[in-house]
Amino acid sequence: MKKILMILLFAALAFFFLIKDKDARKEADPLYHEAKAAIVLEADSGKILYEQNAKEALPIASMSKLMTQYIVLEAISDGHLSWDSQYEPSTAALNQTRHAVILGMDKNKTYSARELFTAMTVTSANDAAIALAEMVSGSEEDFVKEMNKKAKRFGLRNTHFINATGLDEEETNRASAKDVAAIANELLTQYPEVLEFTRLTDFTTSEGTKLWSTNLMLPGMPQAMTGMEGLKTGYTEEAGPCFASTGIYEGKRIITVVIGVGEDSKDTAPRFELTRDLIDRYVLNES
């Protein structure tokens, strides 16, 4: 009985010090409680300038599209697909009308790979992501297999994809902040032309509709930051507000990832504010 009491006492003390340590970290680092995970990466050197819970696999919402972009650009690079390749909307793509962020394809029209890629990148159009997956692999299911193969090839241990969009289904795409940063770095290294799309603040569809970027930190946008060039926003109920950014600061390419900023809040502004704070603190050293 005495032994059991001693074990319980030590367990209680361990729990107490764990909570105190967590509180101390919160007090010392106000970023600690603002996001589920965060990382700041110096792209060329691979040096991590800041990380918080960066290895835990978490829902990543539309940041998943970074891998979709990689595979599409790879298909264009090897000639399997061209920017002028035409897509006739499938039932799967047309059924995305239940989701708020879509290009809104007409079943009687065709769409170029360039328009679909632009819509997916700039406005995070989910129907466009599915369309591109079908163009590359024939079906989203086969495309997802390729996404997971790429994740394994990149050496990502905390990443698993179940769709090309990042939407929550019975399961959801998961990755660590460190893995998302690694995908972003692979994308920027192998296919820097992606920046031609991620820098766009808006684009006009083939039907004449002007759509705006979800990245409010681009030059000319409401929360503009000098040097910002992209990269991908995300939000679902499971993931919360997310953002993977890239830009050139102090002559170096920086990648940041924040996941679940503001917990369950639908307010997307804090993810940009936190990104700015991370860059100011750990890159520009302005605070």
Image: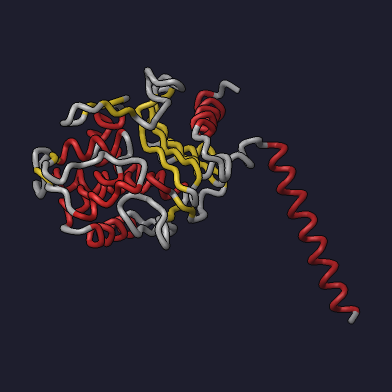
Q: Is residue 259 left or right of residue 140?
A: right
- The structure residue drawn at horizontal position 43% and vertical position 49%, both measured from the top left corner, is 60
Q: Is residue 187 left or right of residue 246?
A: left
Residue at the extreme bottom of the image, as rendered: 1
- The structure residue drawn at horizontal position 33% and vertical position 28%, both measured from the top left corner, is 212
- The structure residue drawn at horizontal position 18% and vertical position 36%, both measured from the top left corner, is 115
Q: In the picture, which quadrant includes the C terminus? A: top right
Q: In the picture, which quadrant includes the N terminus? A: bottom right
Write down the quadrant of residue 63 in the picture: top left
Q: Is residue 103 left or right of residue 47?
A: left
Q: Residue 227, position in %: x, y? A: 39, 22
How many numbered circles are shown?
0
Q: Residue 221, position in %: x, y? A: 40, 21
Residue 41 visible in the snapshot: no
Write down the quadrant of residue 254 in the picture: top left
Q: Residue 76, position in %: x, y? A: 14, 44
- The structure residue drawn at horizontal position 30% and vertical position 52%, both measured from the top left corner, is 164
Q: Nearer the viewer, residue 6 or 73?
A: 73
Q: Residue 274, position in %: x, y? A: 54, 32
Q: Is residue 108 above or below residue 13?
A: above
The colour scheme used here is secondary structure
Q: Nearer the viewer, residue 23 or 197?
A: 197
